[in-house]
Each structure stands twice: as C-alpha cells, then as structure tokens.
Amino acid sequence: MLRYVLSRILSTIPVLFGVTIVVFLLIQLIPGDPAKSILGADATPEAVEELRNNMGLNEPLIVQYGAWLSQLLQGDLGYSYTLHTPIIEELMPRFVNSLILTVASMLICVTLGVILGLISALKKGSFFDKASMGVALIGASMPVFWIALMLMWLFSIKLNIFPVSGMYNMRNPGGFMDLLHHIVLPAFATATVSLAVIARLTRSTVIDILQKDYVNYFHSFGLSKSKINIVHVMRNSLPPIINISGLQVGYIMGGALFSEVVFNWPGIGQALYVAVTSNDYPTIQAGILLIALTFVVVNLVVDLLNVWLSPRLQDSIKAE
Amino acid sequence: MTTKWKQSCKAFLSDKMATTGAIVILFSLILAVFASWIAPYNPNVVAEGSTRLMPPGTEGHILGTDQQGRDILSRVIFGTQTSLISAVIPVIIAAIISVVLGVIAGYYQGFIGNLIMRTMDIFFAFPAVLLAIAIAAILGPGLLNVIIAMVIVRIPYMTRVVYTDTLQESQKEYVEAAKAFGIGDIEIMFKQILPNVLPSLIVYSTTLAGVTIVTVAGLSFIGLGVQPPTADWGRMASDGKKVLMQGYAFVTFIPGIAILILSFSFSMIGDGLRNALDPYERSKAKEKKKISRKTSQHIA
Amino acid sequence: MKEDTLIEVQGLQKVYSGKRSLFTPSKKVTAVKDVSFSIRKGETFGLIGESGSGKTTVGRMILRLIEPTNGSIIYNGQSLRDLSNKEMTSLRKEIQIVFQDSGSAFNPRKTIGAQIAHPLKKFGENQDPQFIHQQVLKMLEVVGLRADFFHRYPHELSGGQRQRAGIARALILKPKFLVLDEPVAALDVSVKAQIINLLIDLQKEFQLTYLFIAHNLDLVAYFCNRVAVLSKGEVIETSSTIDLFNNPKHEMTKKLLSSILTLEGDLGEVYKKRSVI
Amino acid sequence: MNVQSALNTESLLKVEGLSTKIKTPEGVLTVLEDVNLTIEKGEIMAIVGESGSGKSMMINSILQLLPKTLLEAYSGNIEVEGENLFAIGEKKMQEIRGKKISLVAQNAMTSLDPSYRVGKQIVEIMLEKTGLTKEQAKEKALNLLEQMGIDDPKRIFQSYPHQLSGGLRQRVVIAMSLACDPDLIIADEPTSALDPTVQLQVLDLFQTINQQFGTAILMITHDFGVVARIAEKVAVMYAGQIVEKGETADVIFNPTHPYTQSLIKCIPNLDWVFDKGAGKKPLWQIKGEPPNLMNLSQGCRFFNRCHVAKDICQSTNPLLKTVKPYRNEHSVRCVLIGGGNE
C-alpha cells in the first residue's frame, strides 16, 4: 500500500512538469514584444533591448524554460512588474487566506449539497425533490461575482447583518468569531454553484445505488429500510461523492477569485485580479501555477481516499 | 433515422421545461439579430431627456437607466448578441476539435491515445475559469481572445466525454463486425462510432454553452472580453457595483437575471435532450460511469 | 497439411502485457498458451471450454481481430499472419464471424438492412443499388426474416431475430468459413433450437465450414463433428464427437461431460450406465 | 412427498388465483395471470419458463418486493402457513421476509455489497432478524459457510465479494439466504451464470440443504435438466400463466401441454453419439417468439406457436384443469387436453 502511495505521488511528476510547461508557455502568448509592452509605446529601442536581455528573452525558448524552472524549484517565482517585490512574498500570505476561504466554501457546499442530494434521491419525484433540483439548476446558472454582489447588497447594505468587505474588522480585529463573521458571505457566494453541482450529482449517484442488485437483495431479507440506506446506500455512494467534491475544489478556487474581489478578501484571487488589470504577467503566471499545484495535490488526495474506500481498487493495486 | 428522430422530438417537446428553454433561446436569438429594430434606444448613448439611475418602471425606460443614464432594456437586448456568440461559438469549435481528438484517442488507445489524454490531464490541473482568465489576460482584452480562451479551456472536458464513449463503443461487437469485413479505421471511427458518441456530446455541449455564458460574464467582470461601450451583460452587472453601494441594486440585478435566464435555458435544453434520447442512451450513460472514475460533469 | 483441411492453427499464443508501474515490472497475462487444431472443409468443429479458457480469444485471432503473439494460422494454404492488410481484407470475404447476441452486435443507429448491405457496398463486385437491395432481401429470406426487417433498427428485434440478422450479415459476401462465437448462449431454449437448425440448413446450402465456440457440451455434441477441449489456454483433447463422449481421456473432459444435465440425470451417470452395457 | 408435510394440514406456501399487474410507460401490464401453486414443507419445486414468462414476477409477488411506483395491483391470494400475505400488513410481511421465506439471488456478483466483507453481510442479516449476539452470529455464519462446502470458511468470511470465484460467491449467497433458518428459499436461476461444472456442484448443494435442514426450495429455471436433477414438482410457465404442473417425472416423461412437449423436445438428443445406429435427428423447434403481453389476443397464448393448434384454441381461453389418469396431481392449461372446454 505504501508502495502504491509513493508511486501515485511520483506519478504526479509528469503532470506537474506539464503544468510548468503550460504556465511557462502562457507568457509566450503575449502578442508582440513583452519588453515593449511592459515599457510602453514610447520606450527607446535601447531600453527595450536591455530589458529583453535582462528577461533572457534573447535566449532560445528551451533555455528560457530551463532557467525559469530552476528558479522555480528554488522557490523563486520572480518579481512583480508592478510592485517590484518578490512575488512569493506577496502571494504566500494571500495563499493562506485563500485556503481559508476555500475550506469554508467546501464545508458549505459539501454538507449542504450532500444533504440536499440525498433527501432528493430518497424522496425521488416528491415536491421537495423537484423544488430543490430546480433551485440547484438555477444556482448553477449564476455568475459567482453576481451572487456575491447580490448577497452583499442584501445582507450588508440592506440588512446590515454581515460586513461589506475584508477578513477582519479594521478598527478592532477580533479572533475566530470576527473571521467567521467576515467569511460567511464570500464563502456562500463561492459555494453556491458547487453546492448545486454536488446536490445534483449526489442525487443521481444515490438513485443509481438504490437500484443496485445488492440493495434490492438486502430488502428481500426484510431488513429495515433506513438501515439499508445508511449501511449500504450511503457507503457505496461515498466514493463518487468524494470524487465530485474533489473536482469542485478546482471550481471553488476559481470562483473564490470573484468573491475575493467583490468582498475585498486579501487572497490570491484578488492579487490575480490586480495583476490582470495591470498586465503584471509574472504574477499571473505565479498565481496560476500555485493554484494548479494545489489542485494537483487535492486530486492526489481524492484518488488515495478512493483507493482507501474501495476494497476492489486496493486489490487491483496489489495485483499490479 | 426519421422515426427515431421523431420519437426524440416528441419526447423533447413533452418536456415542458426543455421546450420553454428552447423558446427562450429562440426568442433571444431573434432579439440578437433584430436588436437595432427592437431596442427602443441606442444602447451606448444617453437618450435625450433621460437622467442617470432612473428606477425600473419609469415611463419610457421600463427597466430603468444605468449609472450613465443609458436605457437598460436596450442594453440588455443588445447584450444578447455577445452572450450568444460567446456561448455558442467556442463550444462548437471546441466540440469539433474534441471529436477528432477524443475519437482517435478512444479508438486507438495505446501511444496516441495516451499522448492525447495525458496532455488533457495537464489541463485538468488548472481550474478552468482561472486558465481562461490567464489566457485571455495575456492575449489582451477583446471578444475574439475570450473565445480563444474558452475554446482551449473546454477542449479537455469535451475530449474526455468523447474519449470515454468511444472507448466503450469500440469494444462493442458491431465494431468488430466491421473490422471482420476489413472496413477501414477512418470509416469505423467516423461513420460507425461517431453517430453513437455524438448524442451525449450534443447534450454535454448544450449544458456547457450555458456554463460558458456564466464564465464569460466572469471574464467581463474582470475587464476582459468585450470592451465598453458595447453592451455586455457581465460588464453591465459588474459596472453596477459602484452604484450598488449606494443602494441601486437594479443596475446589477437586471443583467444578472438575463445571464441566469439564458444560461438556465441552455441547461434545461441539455436536460431535456438527455431524457429525450432513447432508453438505450440512458443505459449507456450508466455503463460509462463504471468506466470513468472521474465524472466529466464537472462544470467550470 | 492434408488436402481437405480448410484451416490449420499451429501453436497459437496470446500474451497480454499488463500495466507497468514505477516499482514493479509489467506482469504478463497469458490468455492463450498453446492452441493447435485443424478444421476440414465442410465440417463443424467445436471449441469448448469454461469461462477464462481463452476460447473467444482464439476465435478472434483467426479473424485477426486480435493479433496473436505467436503461432500460425494457415487458411487454404495461405498463412494469414503473413498477409498484408490489403491481402487480408480481400480474404475477409471468405472468413466471417457470428457473435453472441448481446444487443451490441449491430450498430444501434443504423437499420438492419443498411448494416447487412454495408459489406456488399464496400466489397461487392456489382455496385448497382437495386442489386444490393435484392441481395439483402434474399439473404433476409434465407435466414427466415421478413422483408420488412430491412428498415428496422436493432433494438426493435428480439434476441432470436437479431441473431438471424447477424447470420445474414456474416453470409452476405458468401464466405466459406464461419466462426460462431457462442451464437445461442444468450437465447431462450425454444429459440436456441431454431438458430441451430438454421445453421445446419445453411451449412448444407452454402457448403460452409464452422468453428463453433461454446461453453457447454450438449449443443456441441449435437452440432459438431469434431471437438477440441480448451482449458486454461491449452487444448487438452481433440477428437471426434463420438470418441470424445464415449472415450474421454482428460480429467477435465470427463468433468465437463458429467456436467451435462439430461432428463434422465446427469450425463456422467447415463454414460456410466452405457459403458457398463 | 415426505411424512412431515402429510401430517401438517397447512401448506407452507399456497398461491391461489394470483394475478399481478404492473404499470409501464405504455400502460398497465398483466404479468401474472391466475397462478396457482402449493409448496409443502421440505419440498423442492421448480418453475420453468423462458424469459418474459413471469418467473421473476412470481418472486416479487410472493415476497411483495415490487416497488409502489411499479405495482398496479395484486389479486388472488398468497398464504404462508395459512396466513394471507395481502392482509397481514407491511410489518408482519417484513417478519416473513428472510425468516420464513428468503431469496437466493440470481447474480451473486452484483447481489453482494462490494464494500463489505461477505461475513459481515451475513452477520448483518442475523443481527437484525434474529436475537443472536454478535459472537453467536459470527459462529453461526462460519458454520453455515462450512456447511456450504466451503473448505476455508474463516478466510471466506473475511473476503470481499470480488475476491471470490463465481461458484464461491454463489455459495455465500446461499449461506446468506439460510441466515435466519427460513422454511422456504426461492432460488432465481441460481446457476445460470455459472460454468457447467460448477453448476452441478451448486445444484447438489441445494439438495443437501433440503435434506439436512428440511428447507423447502422453489427453484426458478429455464433448464429442464436442472428440474430433472433436483425438483419433485414442476410448474411450466408461459406468458404469465402456468400451463402445466405436476410431479417432475410425470411432466418430463409424459408432457401433456404442447408447449411443455416442445420445450422438452428442444433439448438435443445425444443418442447418436452413444448408439452408432441411431443417427442424428433434426432438432425440434418451436416456431416464432413468445407473445407481447401488451397486446394479447383472445384464446390460448401459445396458439401462434403451437404444433397441434386447432380453431377452437384461438377462440377459447384455456383453463388449468386436472388431467387423469396420472397417479399424482397433474394439471394442464390446454383446450385440447382432457376433453377440452366443451
């Protein structure tokens, strides 16, 4: 088993490698001369040439990549064009803040989504089922930034229940409760779409399992329905639900960008937004890379969890 | 084919939600094409006699005016153009590319299949919205660049759908029967297998079109995509943010609802199509679940 | 090679290489270890074995739907494995296969008629659409299907009808040799008999040679002239049906024989009684 | 018939005039019509039929497992030891399931939960249905597995379903069906997915269970070979009706209904391999296919495929009638037999 975990970890290396290539190539997409576009239209040719040399743009692509990668491996994400500070220093604290938001959103969408989907599946065809699936479909059709703005308008401006922005109270930064107070709206805004997706897929998974031969077979023994639902249906629905939830982490990390911007949450998404509006390409590059790396790790964990939950998968691994 | 097609049509039309969705899309298509005739005002210019932030229900401006005093209804009508274009075009282009990649990967498997699918895996490591933002940001603002970004971002998802279906179809005996007659690979792939793969791709594409509207709105929010003053729902909603603080929610609310309705309609059509395809398709969907451990329904 | 031999299989082997991981070398799975037999013109040759014995793989290898790892297949004096793809394609008219009906033997999106006509359109000499249509209708009649089945879709047919259509498709190019891969295993008893009778009639009418793949012996005993028993990828016994039943040599064959259930008890007992007499 | 059941006047299972209607998208479908059968304690009975004959619906009706969304209505009576199942209510019915009547699933692979060890699944049933403690249940499960002819019950107990071979899985499912000492087990084609050699072993196991535990068995199959091997009584079903029933030997060697006759003649005759003079006889075949239950016409349901059909068969609905002069009860649903309906 340990051997499998190790080999599974090692197997992410090609993916990680590919990720760095994609991220590196992103910069090559910049139309025209990046040095020129950084310095602006009225830069002297000498200045442009100097910057090109500094940026290593005159080297062959593969050399540029090698240099970039070796810097990367040393934890050097480069310098921000606009802030002129090492990007890693700017992004790391923000990364933690984003993780807090992501975890909070995941908690919301997984618990509510699974509960909603489960009840809908068990009461398939009922009013509750139709209503909640209708709402879920609507929930999945809204842009995150718009949900964030509407939540903000309703709960912060109109009802004044939750703060408009930030992570802590500016004047009187409190502890955990203060954070909780600030995180509710951005977390819900980020979670809505994933909640809808998880609810829908949980429902279809559970309906699927409910029709399995073994569920019917246990019913034929006159065992109690609720017990069968818990012991057999829920247990076997778990792996697909974990899969779906794992994939939603990616969506949440993407959506977090929008609620971070709307609610002024000092996370990595907000930094990305600033970078996009100011053409700060190295920061965009670094931000995307950081998030992709996190997502790769999440997928790895989800895969390992699945193996842990499935006796059959474990055996097929042992057999290999 | 005709009887089958009729049956599916009948099933689709008996689904009220799906039919409503189709009508909404048709309606918005008409709005988009005839926007200049239908819209009461020029969307980009402040009409004579209007003031800024007139509330919905004001005479002459049923949906009110925005922070600059432009008629919101006219802007919403013109906004259908960019929304439909940015929803449908990238999905169609991505679908065409994905069909080729997915069918080849699923049919040949082996080295070619691995190469294609492992490359796709790399793209799965990026949250789709973020990758789209990065690509669009680096290419620069503009509708064309958003479309390019969306095509790149959608290909891995659609390819995986085509791939799993093709993989499964190519193990079926009718494919072996064709091989036993010595029928060529190209013909088997695109004449025998493709018709069986296409329905689920069409369903998926329809749903993805709805998702793409939402994603593109997000790009507009960041300032990528269509540039002002062209009317664009995402941009309208995000520009309303400034006056939202002052309590004028409708400037943001109305275009958001437009996005919601259009995106929701695509999802409804997608759901309707899925159910309209015969039971054979549904049982196929079940099998597919067994094959691909990761559901491809991940939307982003 | 004897003169009346149509097909001869020598030392056929199929090894699948398993998945390789970083720490373990790839594991090889041998599906077919060593299979040799020869089939005479006009006979029905049975290939029987339990699940996992490799019988289906052998059938597929003869048609080169699966490429063998080792061994030779000689058809009418030609080594199939040495043929170019083009030569093989022209030979495919003579060698065809009927699948176990699982509902997937036909493309669900095309009519039965179109699918039977497909090989004719592709490889037939006469490309006149009218002629092709007539040929398909004739073939439908031969297998006992009404002409209106031409325009039906596979899912509109019952299992037995689909199997008839499958036979029609296999016969449309007038082959000489048919691989029958458990053609009746999925069918009901009453329909099973119809299909076997049809196959017997067709064999006489078109001078066909059959390789009949099955997992149980009762139909084989009725249908085949000679039988090879396959176990774990190897042929353990080959003989005429009569000899096999009266004088089984291998333990596995004996076991398979006694597993046939007849109305008078299992065949093992019936057989014992007979041998006492 | 054994002595015990002769003393007890009440039959273990008595099905009288049972009709089952289900809802389908195309309308209401009568999947079972006027089914009568009786199983005495300790008896082995077989139901023979092709796909679509209503065999599986028999099980669902007896155990009342049809979901409400599918079931239109039952009519007739099902009695278990004199108690009418349609009158006792769901709570008592739950008592009967598993404890009085249990099921041996057709496909053992899909009928065991892949996420739990098989031992745990057997114990789970015992814990809920009987008063056994966990230890007692475990011991009993191990015993059962051993009695199923499993050499290494401890290892099997600890295995997951996918780790077992088809034959072993089927034995586990049979052990499961015996978990609460039922009086009757219904086996739904328990051997059709198995290799022939394993099939024989499993059939023998059923016989052993019947002899050792006195459990009655209702065996559902499509294979007369299986019937001949283990059943004392047999009922032949066609298109939702019982067309012939009686003692196995009577039905097999003196089949009376044309359908039964045909089914038996369809089994390939192997005389030619043993008796060189015999020669191959052509295989008997039944023309056509079973009728669509959705649009049945009047008269005998086998009419279109029957080799002895007469005009009267098309117009008259045959009833199940006792035929003489058999020594045991033997009844047939055919107008042409036993004087007809005239």
Image (cartoon, coloured by chain):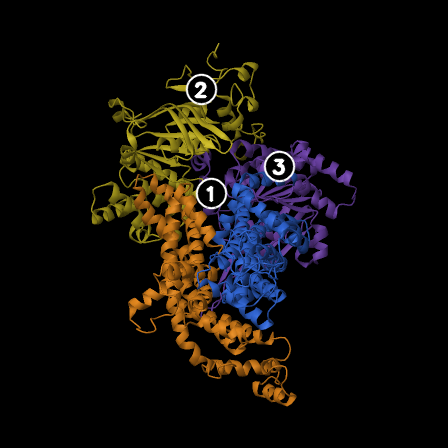
Report the residue marked by disc 3: C164
Q: Tell which chain the image draws in purple.
A: C
Q: Could you tell me if residue C138 is visible in this image?
A: yes
Q: CA distance from mark 1 to mark 3?
A: 29 Å
For label 1, the SS is: helix
In the displayed structure, does residue B259 sit left or right of residue A227? Answer: right
Q: Quadrant of the N terminus of chain B?
A: top right
Q: Tell which chain the image draws in yellow.
A: D
Q: Is residue A210 above or below residue A88?
A: above
Report the residue marked by disc 1: C256
Colour representing chain A: orange
Q: Tell which chain the image draws in blue.
A: B
For label 2, the SS is: strand
Report the front residue among D159 and D65: D65
- Numbered disc 1: what chain? C
Residue drawn at x 55%, y 68% is: B223
Report the residue marked by disc 2: D332
Which amino acid is tagged 1? Leu
